[in-house]
Amino acid sequence: MKLVCGVVLGSAVVLEFLQTLTPDRHGRLLDASEKVIGGLLGILLASIVLRVMERWTAASDV
């Protein structure tokens, strides 16, 4: 889980920083925070779905 969070959040920040290196793009803190929040929501949703699926399959095995 730590690896997933590190990759998602780190890539969001790095991609936004890389936009500052090109003259036609502008990396902003607001955009980086939107990417981070979106990544966190995606991780949260995926973990909820996985837990529900685990419980559902465990209940059907009984």
Image (spheres, rainbow, N blue to C red):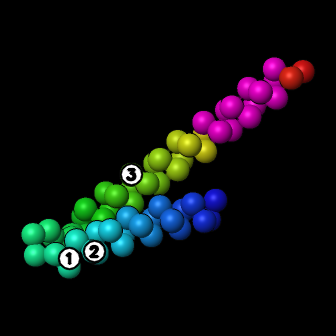
Which residue is found at the position 45% from the left and 70% from the top?
A: 10
Q: Which mark is first along the chain, 3 or 2?
A: 2
Look at the image and give the residue range highlighted in magenta.
Answer: 49-60
Q: Secondary structure at mark 2?
A: helix
Identify the amino acid type marked 1: Thr
Q: Which mark is first along the chain, 3 or 1?
A: 1
- For the residue pair 33 and 46, the one nearer the viewer reads as 46
Q: Quadrant of residue 34?
A: bottom left
Please report contact status of discs 2 and 3: CB closer than 8 Å, yes or no.
Answer: no
Residue 19 in the image: above or below residue 42: below
Label number found at residue 44 = none
| Location of residue 5 in the rendering, given as x and y in whole percent from the top left corner | 54, 62
Q: Is residue 2 left or right of residue 16?
A: right
Q: Which tag is nearer the camera, tag 2 or tag 3? A: 2
Q: Quadrant of residue 46?
A: top right
| Location of residue 19 in the rendering, given as x and y in whole percent from the top left corner | 22, 71
- For the residue pair 58 and 14, the one nearer the viewer reads as 14
| Location of residue 41 in the rendering, given as x and y in whole percent from the top left corner | 46, 48
Please report contact status of discs 2 and 1: CB closer than 8 Å, yes or no.
Answer: yes
Residue 7 in the image: above or below residue 21: above
**Which residue is under mark 2?**
18
How far, Cα to Cα, is label 1 from label 3? 21 Å
How far, Cα to Cα, is label 2 from label 3? 19 Å
Q: Main secondary structure of the magenta part?
A: helix
Q: Is residue 12 magenta?
A: no
Please report contact status of discs 1 and 3: CB closer than 8 Å, yes or no.
Answer: no
Which residue is found at the position 25% from the left and 62% from the top?
A: 31
Looking at the rendered image, the quarter that the C terminus falls into is: top right
Q: Residue furthest right?
A: 62
**Which residue is under mark 3?**
38
Identify the amino acid type marked 2: Leu
